[in-house]
Amino acid sequence: MTVSLNRRRFLSAAGLAGAGLAVPSLLSACGDDADAGKGTGKGEISLWIDITGDANQKYFDEKVIGAFHAANPDITVKTTYYKGQDLRQQVQTALQARSGPDIVRGPSATQTIAWSKARLLADLTPYAKQWGWNDKLTDWAVQAFTTDGKLYALPMRVDTMLLYFNKTLFTQKGWTQPKNRSDLEAFAADAMGQGIIPFGSSNTDWTAAGEWLMTLFWNNFAGGDAVYQALTGKIQFSDPVFVDTVSLLKSYFDKGWVGGGADKYFSVPAAEVGAGLGKGTVATIPQGEWYMSNIGAFFGKAGNNTNEWDWMAMPPLSSTAKADSYAIGIGGSFAINQASKNQDAAAAFLNWYYGDRTAALQRMADVPATYNIPITFKADEIPQKTDPRAARVLTEVDKAVSSGNYGYVTWTWWPPKSDVYVYEGLEQVLTGKITAAEYCKQLATTFTAEKQQGNLPQLMPRTSQ
């Protein structure tokens, strides 16, 4: 995957220091409270992480933690697994109590800003200088985790939104991939008329699922430029283009096109929606790239059918949106607990995780779209065993970022309270408690207040640099 981003470039092909590196003690690390937790760069460190499923945990134990131990025998990483919502609560509580894991698996940039301002995370700037992270990590991702000139976290994964579809069903029905709103709505009407839910969706397992939909619709109806202008305060989220976007999504729900309607969206488990996609009772599912590691359970032998799946980009829903545009963001972060007694060892793990380029590429191949840390590689360097659908995510997102044809995911670029209101307010719209205009007005009010408080990460710029 070739990149010409300069300031937004991906990790250097040369990589960071490789496995087996020596780990120096950085005497200037970690801000005003540095003396509390420099450590020796040896011994035991802890990591809490939200990886679920026996197979996924086994892979992480063997291919990540096990590989690190082999390369760094003086450091032991003790891993504890949680579900996503549970992990957020546990980490928040622990950090506030000045306890918890040495390596913090955090949410995205917005929450990290709050934690860094509360002095709960260690300053990574000395480590970044020692190992050249700022030169080798994508600049926009580094800036998103930089507060008051200090780096407090590293991006776990580059996120985007995709439209997964039952490829076999599309072939059987003679459907082609929609190129615009007219195509999309014609497909949806046809599918619904045949008793097939056009867009499977549910928030029963993840209450924030509504922001996935808003991310897709705002960026593909209002367009990435309008979203950027709103995030920078040049226009308001209460402006007509954003209200119209919410109204459009609400109309799709009212027709039963999304999730079979609001009632089912709030009640049908996500696994049932996925099974419907595999069987062909659901035609598409709007989801993040991370869903690629789970979708296989609903197709082929695993799903007790002979169907195949694929994905497409969400088509533009207005003349102001562009084709083949992808909303870009960060899927979580790795940071170091300010209360850690061994910050040097924790930093050594981070440096190994991001620096072993060969291992990183192999993880991308082994587990589709889950370990997509931003490193530079050419298309022919992608391991041959990589699912071509996963490889296409890498190349298409790269193309979109390189050309400036991208939007913004809510969970990275919206400040914390605004981000929560994106999905909580949408629930009120879908249940008829408030109108689309009222929803957008409240979002604009909340966003303006947070922006004035400085609780926004630095945005990806609109032009290639």
Image: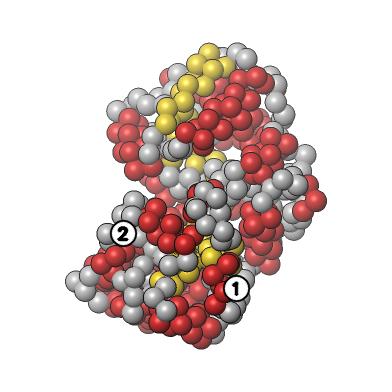
Residue 47 place in picture, x, y as percent:
46, 28
The residue depicted at 48 percent of the width and 85 percent of the height is: 186
* Amino acid found under the numbered disc labelled 2: Val
Q: Is residue 339 visible?
A: yes
Residue under label 1, please give it: 171
Residue 422 place in picture, x, y as percent:
34, 63
Quadrant position of residue 114: top left
Kindly state the secondary structure of the residue where label 1 is placed. helix
Q: Residues within 10 Å of mark 1 (few under 14, many from 20)?
A: few
Residue 294 place in picture, x, y as percent:
50, 49
The residue depicted at 55 percent of the width and 21 percent of the height is: 345
Q: Observer-nearest residue: 80 or 7?
A: 80
* Amino acid found under the numbered disc labelled 1: Thr
Question: Vertically, is 16 above or below 272?
Answer: above
The residue depicted at 40 percent of the width and 71 percent of the height is: 197
Q: Residue 268's mark?
A: 2
Is 357 on the left or on the right of 310, as rendered? right
Q: Earlier in the sequence, mark 2 or mark 1?
A: 1
Is 415 on the left or on the right of 302, as rendered? left
Residue 297 place in picture, x, y as percent:
50, 49
The residue depicted at 64 percent of the width and 41 percent of the height is: 366
Question: Vertically, is 175 above or below 464?
Answer: below
Q: Residue 409's mark?
A: none
Q: Observer-nearest residue: 435 or 451?
A: 435
Query: Which quadrant, please, contains the C terminus?
Result: bottom right
Is 339 on the left or on the right of 324, as rendered? left
